[in-house]
Amino acid sequence: MAQLSPLLKQATPVVVDHGEGVYLYDTAGKRHLDFTAGIGVTSTGHCHPHVVSAAREQIGKLIHGQYTTVMHKPMLELTEKLGSVLPKGLDSLFYANSGSEAVEAALRLSRQATKRPNIIVFQGGFHGRTVAAATMTTSGTRFSAGISPLMSGVHVAPFPYAFHYGWDEGTATKFALRELDYLFATVCAPNETAAFFIEPVLGEGGYVPANPEFLAGLRERADKHGILLVMDEIQTGFGRTGKFWGHDHFGVRPDIVLIAKGLASGFPISGIAASGELMAKALPGSQGGTYGGNAVACAAAIATLEVIEREGLVENAAERGRQLLEGVRVIADKSPSIGDVRGLGLLVGSEFTTPDGEPDTAKAQAAQKAASANGLLLLTCGAYMNVVRMVPPLVVNAEQVDDALRVWGDVVAGVE
Ligand code: PMP
């Protein structure tokens, strides 16, 4: 009899039977409040009726129509719909299936368009697990462990992570801008650099919002040196941060936006968006795959975008995000084990540290496990897995946020 690979290790013992809204129901009938959303994917909640019916209808019409052979209506419609929410000028789209593939597509496009070899990524960034994306990932050493030689041409610059470096509000920007100078003095050879890949909020790296002046400075230098600014919005897009795009908080214009996760409520689809002029610089035949832009996934994505708009999920993420962040801060204030609480919209992280400021992985893991045992599903993140993160579906309501805070308060008190 076949067994599941030990690689499929779970953070919780839950075996899910079905999901509805912000809840998952296990095979024994127990209800769990899902503050993981399939790692930021099921933004419209589990099995939103509008998404389910759009996908059902599409399955009966066409499941797969490979785009190098034929075009299909859902992809055309999705492209038009995304055009209305993407930053102005980013009017050309290309689809894949996973976040990592979108990262690879943007990497290829950046090198082909600029004819330069180097890619600059930022410490603590996560871009995926294919070999190129893993090379670009520094949110933990485990993602590229044992697979060297990695891809060449990737250079890592510091990411202004105020808590990590011990900066307070008054000094954070000054030091962040020094990091930008450091980047150009040491890591980045401007004429050899194709692109910067950055997340507006470090996701897997510990839910750390970028410093606004740092991002603005990066844009300025990118313009000056003809370097492309690639915004990895895979975890932060589609309202997650309380604005439609994570970068909307910073007023910084990207050259390429990477999308996935929240786009289709759980159907596998990802994409890259750029200007038509830039996209035309990709070499024919070098991009693509069999399944990218699957017709059912496109239909689910269209329905997801409709739900986001109709139900005001971006505004809800902003409001519920404020409620959650505030509540988590109050809990952290009473706990000597939580050194920092950060967040933007419905991305909220509590960083566990020892009394001398070292990462306290054991306590974070204990808190995550205790929460899950008490019906609140959570995950950890950060280089040391010492940040407990909350990333609920964007449909979460005030009462459900209160329920989660009650469990979290008890759990934190219990691990002290
Ligand atoms: N970029 C970011 C910012 C992500 O959060 C992730 C997934 N956590 C990825 C890329 C990779 O996506 P995937 O797992 O679908 O390959």
Image (cartoon, rainbow, N blue to C red):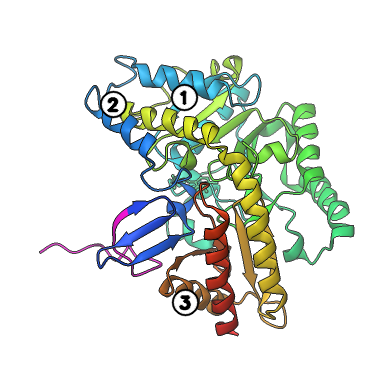
x then y, percent, for residue 353: 66, 76
Q: Residue at x 69, y 51 (%)?
A: 209
On screen, residue 330 versus residue 137, left or right, reads right
x then y, percent, for residue 250: 75, 39
Q: Main secondary structure of the magenta part?
A: loop
x then y, percent, for residue 151: 50, 44
The amino acid pointed to by label 2 is Gln
Tell which tag, 1 or 2, sits nearer the viewer: 2
The amino acid pointed to by label 1 is Phe
Separation of marks 2 and 3 at Cα, in angstroms: 41 Å
Q: Earlier in the sequence, mark 1 or mark 3?
A: 1
Mark 3 Cα-neighbour bin, 10 Å: few <14, some 14–19, many ≥20: many
Residue indicated by mark 2:
58
Residue 161 appears in the picture as rendered: yes
Separation of marks 1 and 2 at Cα, in angstroms: 21 Å
Q: Residue at x 81, y 52 (%)?
A: 176
Separation of marks 1 and 3 at Cα, in angstroms: 42 Å
